[in-house]
Image (cartoon, helix red, strand yellow):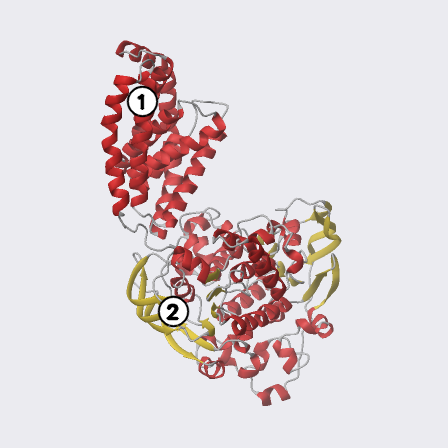
Amino acid sequence: MSNYEFADFSFSYGGADVPALRNIDLTDAGGVTLLVGGNGSGKTTLLRQLLPSLRPHGRRSGSLRLLEGAPDARQAAAGIGYVGQDPAAQLLTDRVWRELALTAENLGWPQAEIAAAIAETAALLGIGGWLERETAALSAGERQLVAVAAALVTRPRLLLLDEPCAHLDAPARTRLLMALRQVVAARQLSVVVAEQDFAPWLMVADRVCYLHGGALQFCLPPVEAAERLKSTPLRQALPLAMRADRDKIAAFVPHRPQVVAGESLLIAEGLGYSYGETTLFENIDITLQKGSISVLLGANGSGKTTLLELLQGVRERQSGQVSGQAALLPSRPQYLLLGESVGQALCRHADEAAARQALRRVQAEELWHRHPADLSGGQKQRAALALLLLMRPDVLLLDEPEAGLDAAARLRLAALLRDLRGEGLALLMVTHDAELAAAVADRALLLADGRIAADLPYAQFVAQYAEWQPQAWRLCPGCLHAEELLDEQDVADAAEELPVAAAAAAPVAVQDAPKAGLGRLEALLWLLLPLTAGLGWAHLGARRSFVLSLLLLVEAALPLLLRFERKGYAPRRLAFLAGFCAFAVVGRLAFFMLPQVKPLLALVCLGALFLGAESGLWLGATAMFLSNFFFTHGPWTPWQMLAAGASAAVFGLLGRHLGRRGQAVLSGALALLVYGPIANLGSLLIYHPTPTLPLYAAVMLAGLPFDITHAVVTAGFMYILSPVIGRRVKWLRDRYGI
């Protein structure tokens, strides 16, 4: 049974001149399909086409059949598992067992069935002892395994993995590969894997598909594919035994020049760290010397990332001290790239000439105009490294800098690190890549059992610890660098990286699927409004104005809600609206001590500006309703909901034609002329049994100081927030096709 089929399929991101995918013909053949290719070749884009909720927004041609047709959201959630490049972004709960149960619970599985599925999957991946652990305390590699386990719990028919081994140590990677082979055999599961460091996958893959420039060059069994890949830019990622000359290996005499390090640039003494009652490590002493490269090795969860953060100072030290300053390249480098483009992020720290030179040094000049969130994992690594180099640090800490890089980019990274050592920097790198460590390291530190278990010159270290021996050592004892055993032309040039349009993540925004039944009910509710008004005025008696107004508000809200439902908005639009609504509520809570100073109205108006008047009405009413859970509900709530929703809706209609100042003035005017009069009318009807026009005028006059204050504050918030939040919302809308 085929789970997917591409037929002459092409895809281009919105506004891109170069197609991201071109004329793809690919049919599910069962088993493990391995997608290989350089950075920007289209692997992630192709993978995301197979998941409706993450399908990129753009232009498509050809056809794609998925799960025997077009699955709805429930079928896709049950039938397709996905693990992205950043598994930490997928973890939504506080405990591992809750994360594994989440999808099955949302699908309505019985609790006993969920518990059995969790136990089976956790045992398969060797994480049975982690179920009560907090997800926030997991290492990057542990998060990766948990994300894979969560994707497997519901027994999907199709499993999509985007670089699932990027943060795994060797034992965890082997365990994952073997577990996948068992699952594929037992469950008839189809797996599609996109991977840069693909050599270990050749043992378990059923076929290897090579992408270059968005085109599928071939799909072959692993042995045949490896032969073909020898003549492609990916030859460096193949096992060394396939590339090296046996005669040259036999005749090679390894020679290791002694590296003489200089003065100590960073000294750490007695470092310790604990999570609650669990001690991660204690009494760690590390010295980093000028002109040296040290690698920090250890199993997933041993504390390597935490130790780097303590050395840099981003994490507060619980014990011990550090002398010296260091710059840190984190495993999630996107947090360093603050700006609307890579160039803008770099220019925060230097002038344009220096920023461009830093990008050239990491061979990422093509990223200058790209938005940081549109970059692939490897591109983010290079851009963030360029930013750190602008700071001219004496000590550079790197947390798995090879993650997301293809083989050619790893060679360039190794050359750059050796150059930095030659310039006198002290480098400490966390890595699970034995080949990269062997290519650059002078010294190895092994973190295990809460202590530095080994601190040795690198050649001496790999002689003692066989699990860290690179491929070159196994072919030629004493050899560390693969380059030593290869012909010069085999490693001279890196692969050409064809720039592909920005990697987004979203399907088509709004699917207009009118529902006839809801439409008839909506029409009926509108007809009830005049009937309610007539009967209510005749029969409600005292306080009829107040009671009747609330009835009419509720009756008017129902058809508006039905219209919103009838539109059939895509889940990602609803999720975006919900997130923006929460942002507005938090904004109001932040200024709870000053009732008239709140950014809520400005925020919902900004949402309406980019999502439309109808969404603005929903956003304003919902944000006011939710925030009143904290500020006390009462008969005034419906009036506040109407006031905020109407103001946002009008802003959505008029604000798009104005500039920054015009939008600020409009928002203030709406606060004064729409929000204020509606809220004051509600107050009149609530507190006066016989409302009259003179009374309304008196209420308006009494509330005028508060309304003016609210208007000025709203205009101020709009002026301040619109260039920051507005650009971000517009980018999200365009990127995700909302």
Furthest residue in direction front, as rendered: 539
Mark closer to the chain start, 2 or 1 = 2
Q: Is residue 308 left or right of residue 670?
A: right
The percent position of residue 47, horizontal first and vertical second, equals 42, 65
The percent position of residue 332, horizontal first and vertical second, equals 53, 54
The number of discs equals: 2
Q: What residue is shown at x 56% (from left), y 79% (from top)? A: 240
Q: Quarter holding the N terminus?
A: bottom left
Mark yes or no: residue 399 visible: no
Callout 1 crowding tier (Cα within 10 Å): few <14, some 14–19, many ≥20: some
What is the C-alpha distance between the residues marked 2 and 1?
Answer: 55 Å
Q: Quadrant of residue 681?
A: top left
Q: Quadrant of residue 628?
A: top left
In depth, the one of 648 and 443 nearer the eye is: 648
Q: Pointer 2 and pointer 1: residues touching (CB < 8 Å)?
A: no
Q: Is residue 357 above or below residue 5?
A: above
Q: Which mark is residue 4?
A: 2
Q: Which mark is residue 298?
A: none
In depth, the one of 299 and 542 nearer the eye is: 542
Secondary element type, mark 1:
helix
Q: Is residue 138 above or below residue 678?
A: below
The residue under label 1 is 549
Mark yes or no: residue 101 visible: yes
Identify residue type, mark 1. Answer: Ser
